[in-house]
Image (cartoon, rainbow, N blue to C red):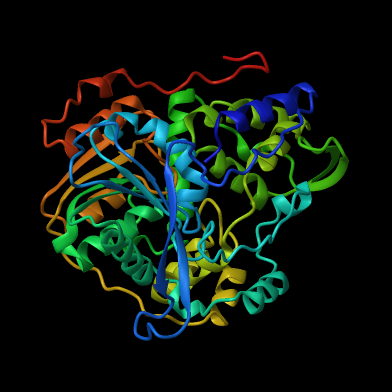
């Protein structure tokens, strides 16, 4: 997701200012008042006598003298985000109301963060690299062959088993699972595999196996774009940008001049990423208007804010096993006419053809209580996927959060609903009517 820093970077690019952004200093434990530790698990659960993995675990203890016995386990998205190493420093402050009565537990999923990371820098920092839509198969093959891992054991099924091993090691009988995006899939797999240890689920931006990435990416992005145009009160006019366009401009982060080519594919992909966050979406009309006039600096700013790094080994282990094999030829053919076209599908399919095959899970009913939250403007996991997931979750309560895109965590109202649900109180939905989309920018000074 593009955060507030991303918005500032785009504005700086448009204004000609070039901020220097330093990486935060690394600490032994990412959250100062938390406890960090390691839990060893077998890479292949069927052969515990062979290779082991050390999972990095962060526990933010409750401020209560007598905390509730059922902690909240936070599950990161992606697949490929690191819950303990990367997200805990953001989520612990956001979840402070929940932390008042419950411990918060963050686990770097195997293949991410400090848990045998399967990281691969496929794109680098240049704008040209950031704008490419296809995977570099040679780089990816080199990463795949260099990973110190048996990639068959990095699917969601094994991540769920890891979570249960951490639960047992920490001495928790029943746990609450709180996941976002791909983390919702992991939470659902855990709940159906270990129902006796699952108290409740809080799932934000549902990505069940039925989503079959990347089949519906273009369709769901087009829906979010239509909602933006509805709220803007006019067509965005993407089709009127003269593309392809080769321009020379400064890199927003480094200030170095680069000559880059904007195409329909990479411009539409940038717009899709901007739709992940309402604040960044508010810049889109201005960025498109400028591009129509031949000024691509704002679009370059969007490209620079996207985090192109990633745990690609984990991402492909999940997608190549759980999503791509179930995509039909008819579904692939339908991609060609969607908002994003095939959007890198060809090289992803090629990468998956050589990716090791691992065991996967089969969807099943989930009996635990569940709160399903969705942003009304979400461009990747819109409300229809929560409706799909709810079909096998008879005790699910669904809430659509207005004027919100991918991830409702940033809304105080949504976090209040999460707290109410975990405490088994009636949900106070009155605050939902107060949430509004940020106004659109008319120039660099603001709305």
**How many numbered marks have been drawn onto this rendered protein structure?**
0
In depth, the one of 53 and 286 nearer the eye is 53
List the single residue furthest toward the front: 65
Res. 327 visible in picture = no
In the depicted structure, whether residue 56 falls above or below residue 374: below
x, y percent for residue 236: 56, 32
Res. 351 visible in picture = yes
In the depicted structure, whether residue 331 falls above or below residue 407: below
Q: Residue at x 46, y 49 (%)?
A: 84
x, y percent for residue 442: 61, 17
In the rendered view of the protein, which quadrant contains the C terminus? Answer: top right
Q: Residue at x 61, y 15 (%)?
A: 446
In the image, 259: left or right of 166? right
Q: Can you tell which quarter of the image residue 425 is in?
A: top left
In the depicted structure, whether residue 376 falls above or below residue 175: above
In depth, the one of 248 and 56 nearer the eye is 56
Q: Residue at x 51, y 49 (%)?
A: 85
Q: Residue at x 84, y 41 (%)?
A: 247
x, y percent for residue 41: 39, 71
In the depicted structure, whether residue 8 falls above or below residue 245: above
Q: Can you tell which quarter of the image residue 382 is in?
A: top left
In the image, 185: left or right of 390? right
x, y percent for residue 9: 68, 30
């Amino acid at each position: 997701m593009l955060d507030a820093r991303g918005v500032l970077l785009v504005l700086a690019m448009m204004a000609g200012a070039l901020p220097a952004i330093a990486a935060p200093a690394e600490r032994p434990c990412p959250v100062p008042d938390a406890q960090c530790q390691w839990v060893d698990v077998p890479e292949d659960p069927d052969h515990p006598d062979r290779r082991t993995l050390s999972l990095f675990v962060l526990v933010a203890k409750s401020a209560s003298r007598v905390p509730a016995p059922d902690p909240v386990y936070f599950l990161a998205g992606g697949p490929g985000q690191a819950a303990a190493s990367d997200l805990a420093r953001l989520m612990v402050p956001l979840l402070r109301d929940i932390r008042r009565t419950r411990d918060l537990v963050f686990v770097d999923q195997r293949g991410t963060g400090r848990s045998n990371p399967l990281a691969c820098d496929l794109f680098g920092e240049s704008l040209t690299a950031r704008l490419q839509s296809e995977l570099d198969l040679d780089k990816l093959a080199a990463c795949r062959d260099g990973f110190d891992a048996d990639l068959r054991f990095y699917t969601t099924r094994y991540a769920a088993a890891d979570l249960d091993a951490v639960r047992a090691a920490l001495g928790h009988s029943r746990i609450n699972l709180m996941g976002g995006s791909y983390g919702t899939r992991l939470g659902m797999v855990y709940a159906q595999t270990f129902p006796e240890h699952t108290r409740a689920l809080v799932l934000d931006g549902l990505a069940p196996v039925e989503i079959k990435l990347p089949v519906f990416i273009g369709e769901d992005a087009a829906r979010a774009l239509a909602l933006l145009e509805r709220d803007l009160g006019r067509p965005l006019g993407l089709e009127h940008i003269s593309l392809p366009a080769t321009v020379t401009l400064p890199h927003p982060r480094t200030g170095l001049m680069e000559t880059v080519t904007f195409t329909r594919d990479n411009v539409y992909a940038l717009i899709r990423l901007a739709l992940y966050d309402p604040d960044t979406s508010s810049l889109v009309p201005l960025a498109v208007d400028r591009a129509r006039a031949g000024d691509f600096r704002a679009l370059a700013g969007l490209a620079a804010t996207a985090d192109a790094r990633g745990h690609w080994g984990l991402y492909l282990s999940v997608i190549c096993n759980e999503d791509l094999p179930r995509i039909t030829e008819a579904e692939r053919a339908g991609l060609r006419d969607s908002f994003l076209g095939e959007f890198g599908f060809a090289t992803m399919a090629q990468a998956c053809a050589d990716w090791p095959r691992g065991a996967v899970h089969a969807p099943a009913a989930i009996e635990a209580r569940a709160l399903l939250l969705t942003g009304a403007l979400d461009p990747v996991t819109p409300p229809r996927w929560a409706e799909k997931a709810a079909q096998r979750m008879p005790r699910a309560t669904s809430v659509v959060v207005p004027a919100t895109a991918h991830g409702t965590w940033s809304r105080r109202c949504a976090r209040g609903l999460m707290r109410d649900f975990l405490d088994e109180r009636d949900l106070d939905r009155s605050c939902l009517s107060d949430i509004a989309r940020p106004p659109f920018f008319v120039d660099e000074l603001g709305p």
